[in-house]
Structures are given as C-alpha cells and as structure tokens.
Amino acid sequence: MRIDVLSLFPEFVSQVASHGVVGRAQERGLLSIHGWNPRDYAEGNYRRVDDRPFGGGPGMVMMIEPLRTALAAVRAVDPRPTRVIYMSPQGAPLTQAKARELAGLERLVLLCGRYEGVDERFLQAEVDEELSIGDYVLSGGELAAAVVIDATARLLPGALNDAESAAQDSFEGEGGLLDCPHYTRPLEHPFGAVPPVLLSGNHAEIAKWRRKQSLGRTWLRRPELIDRDQLSKADRALLEA
Ligand code: SAM
C-alpha cells in the first residue's frame, strides 16, 4: 500500500509513522509513506499557501493552487487510482471498519489542513471523502493523518506478528465487542490475583470467561455497541449469568 500525505509539516507524519508496527510494516515492504508539502508547489518569493477568508473574519484559508499542483504531482508518480481523504472535524468518524476498508486500498492520499481549513472549492473538486478522528478541533490534520495511518497499517496482512493479532482486539471479531482484560506475570502481586480460570488450562472455559468479560465491559462502557436482539443465545446467557 502507498500512502501520500499532503501537509505543511509532512516530516511530522513520517516521524510518527517510523516507529513500532507502522515502521515495521514499511521495513517489510507492506507500506510506503510519502510526504508532500504544498509550499513546494506554491508560486512567488514567499511561496504563499494561505490567504484571508472572503467575507472577513479571523484566520487564514489554505489556497487552491498549491494544493491542486501538489496533488497532481502525487497522482503522477503512480498510475494506480487513489482515494483522496481530507482530515476534518466535519468528516465521518474514523472507525475500525473504516480502517479495515482503507487497508484494502492500494493507494491513499491524506490531506492535512491547517488554519481555518481548505478552500471549499478544492474539497469539492478533488476530495473523495472527509474523515474525523473525534468531536474536537486539532490545530492541524497531521495528528489525525497519523492516527489513520496507524489504524490502517496494523491491519495490512503481515504487519502484525502472531502474538499481536488484531483478530481479538476491540471492535473486531464477532459482534464488534470490546476486548477482554489481560493478565501476565507475576502471578502473585499486591495489586491482586489473576482470575483462576486463566490458570486452569481449560481452553473452552477460558474462551467462555473471555467472551463474558467482553460482553460485560461492552455492556457497561459502550452499551450502544451491543444490539441485544442480534446476540446469540449463548451470548445472551453469558450476559445474563
Ligand atoms: N475551521 C475548521 C472547522 O471548524 O471545521 C477547523 C480547522 S482546524 C483548526 C485545522 C485543520 O485541522 C483542519 O483543516 C483539519 O485538517 C484538522 N483537524 C482538526 N480537527 C480534526 C479532527 N477532529 N479530525 C481530523 N482532522 C482535524
């Protein structure tokens, strides 16, 4: 997969994406990330990329032309069609399902805004969709793009080692529940005991306990994720036990 990031601070995103699972995905040749700065495509001595908003008011707006030229250059380096996503608080919320969908693409362009955002005409003409990472306003789209890259890259086949398998993560698996709690050594600790079932060696009982924990904490923490009518008989019994 190839991800191109259009940003006034492209090195910020590449820096975040060079560690851990995302860095490893790049080393393994599963992913390549390329930063593009619209300032490099701006004209004039000052290489201006923003201007005052028509109608007045505070802040600046990112101009069409530097973005249009930069995006044309991005498209030209690789003949494969690409989806263009603008990181925006007004976009659809990023979900695990969306990350899965993006991980199936060959190419992706992430556009990071700054200031008051991007001239609406550019968004209308060039952007396929807008994505938000939550109902709050960041000062720029770079952190949001890094979040999209991380959530997507770890789902690329071969990015995670077996022990880190995404299949049992929250929002994955049957019903999209939250993950169960996890414990590791030491067995004895002043902070408390490890649930005995996890030491029993009884895999069926362990799976049942984990499912019950997932159902219980999803019910308590994110009840909107559970559709009671869609629960299997076994899940309903676990939830009510
Ligand atoms: N005036 C814009 C609004 O209220 O919708 C906010 C502009 S914000 C200060 C600057 C840039 O940060 C945006 O263009 C967008 O790229 C990015 N951004 C801010 N919050 C975001 C969020 N929750 N999710 C994704 N991107 C965000």
Image (cartoon, rainbow, N blue to C red):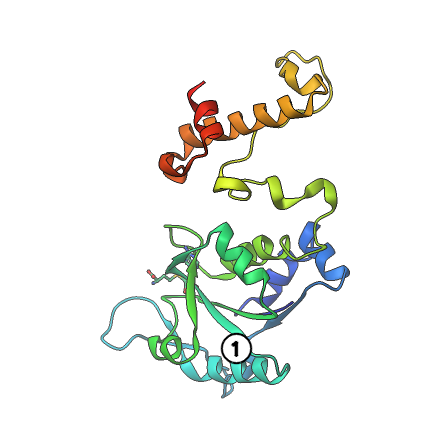
The structure residue drawn at horizontal position 46% and vertical position 26%, both measured from the top left corner, is 216
Q: As drawn, which residue projects farthest toward the right?
A: 28
Picture layout, residue 184 above or below residue 70: above
Which quarter of the image is occupied by the C terminus? top left
List x then y, in percent, for residue 115.
40, 66
Q: Quadrant of residue 199?
A: top right
Q: Which kind of residue does numbered mark 1 sit on?
A: Pro
List x then y, in percent, for residue 117.
38, 68
Q: Can residue 116 be seen by looking at this rendering?
A: yes
Q: Nearer the viewer, residue 87 or 13?
A: 87
Picture layout, residue 99 above or below residue 36: above
Q: Can residue 6 be seen by looking at this rendering?
A: no
Q: Nearer the viewer, residue 112 or 147?
A: 147
Q: As drawn, which residue projects farthest toward the bottom?
A: 44
Q: Nearer the viewer, residue 209 or 178?
A: 209
In-image side of 57 versus 222 (left or right) = left
At numbered mark 1, what does the secondary structure look like: helix, strand or loop? Answer: helix
Q: Quadrant of ligand 1?
A: bottom left
Ligand 1 lies under 8 Å from the Cβ of mark 1: no
Residue at which label 1 appears: 38
Q: Quadrant of residue 25?
A: bottom right
The structure residue drawn at horizontal position 41% and vertical position 35%, both measured from the top left corner, is 222
